Image: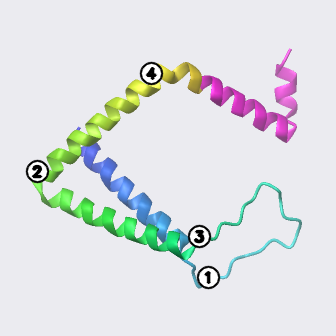
């Protein structure tokens, strides 16, 4: 359980750091499509304030992960918090599983309908 909690915290820190790095403008040229642009794509360019906030969040999470790894008291507290979060998430999923399944089914049907999937029409009576 301790390893799961520590892994959870580290993954969250890495995810935030990765998100911040991926939003930074790079020197790599971006390949642009010469054909028609599809309607389901979005060009996301973060504002300077958002970029700065993401960088600060990534740095704070990295510092937190290092502190958790080095301080036994903080590590214990982080594991308790992570355990509580996992327990809460399990309870929510168990209580809301019917609604989650209905939402996933509705989303799958909408995706199939928007793509004109012939299999979805054949399955429906």
34, 37: nearer the viewer:
37
Residue numbers of the magenta segment: 101-125
5 part of magenta stretch: no
For the stretch drawn in magenta, what is the main secondary structure?
A: helix
User: Image point 56% across, 19% down: which residue?
Assistant: 98
Question: Most extreme residue toward the top, as rendered?
Answer: 125
Q: Which residue is mark 2?
A: 73
Task: Return the mark for residue 87.
Answer: none
Q: Eyeballing the image, is 29 above or below 104?
A: below
Q: Looking at the image, is mark 2 or mark 4 earlier in the sequence?
A: 2
10 Å crowding of disc 4: few (<14), some (14-19), many (20+): few
Which numbered disc, 4 or 1, marks the residue closer to the eye? 4
Q: Which residue is mark 1?
A: 28
Q: Position of residue 59 (x, y in %)?
A: 34, 69
In terms of secondary structure, where does tag 3 sit? loop
Q: Looking at the image, is mark 4 or mark 1 earlier in the sequence?
A: 1
Q: Which residue is mark 4?
A: 94
In terms of secondary structure, where does tag 4 sit? helix
């Amino acid at each position: 359980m301790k390893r799961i909690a520590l892994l959870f915290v580290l993954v969250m820190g890495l995810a935030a750091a990765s998100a911040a790095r991926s939003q930074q403008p790079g020197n790599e040229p971006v390949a642009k499509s010469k054909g028609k642009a599809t309607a389901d794509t979005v060009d996301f360019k973060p504002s300077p304030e958002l970029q700065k906030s993401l960088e600060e969040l990534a740095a704070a999470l990295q510092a937190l992960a290092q502190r958790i790894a080095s301080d036994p008291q903080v590590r214990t507290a982080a594991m308790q918090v992570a355990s509580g979060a996992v327990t809460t998430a399990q309870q929510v999923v168990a209580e809301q599983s019917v609604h989650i399944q209905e939402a996933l089914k509705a989303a799958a049907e909408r995706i199939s309908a928007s793509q004109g999937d012939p299999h979805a029409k054949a399955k429906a009576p």
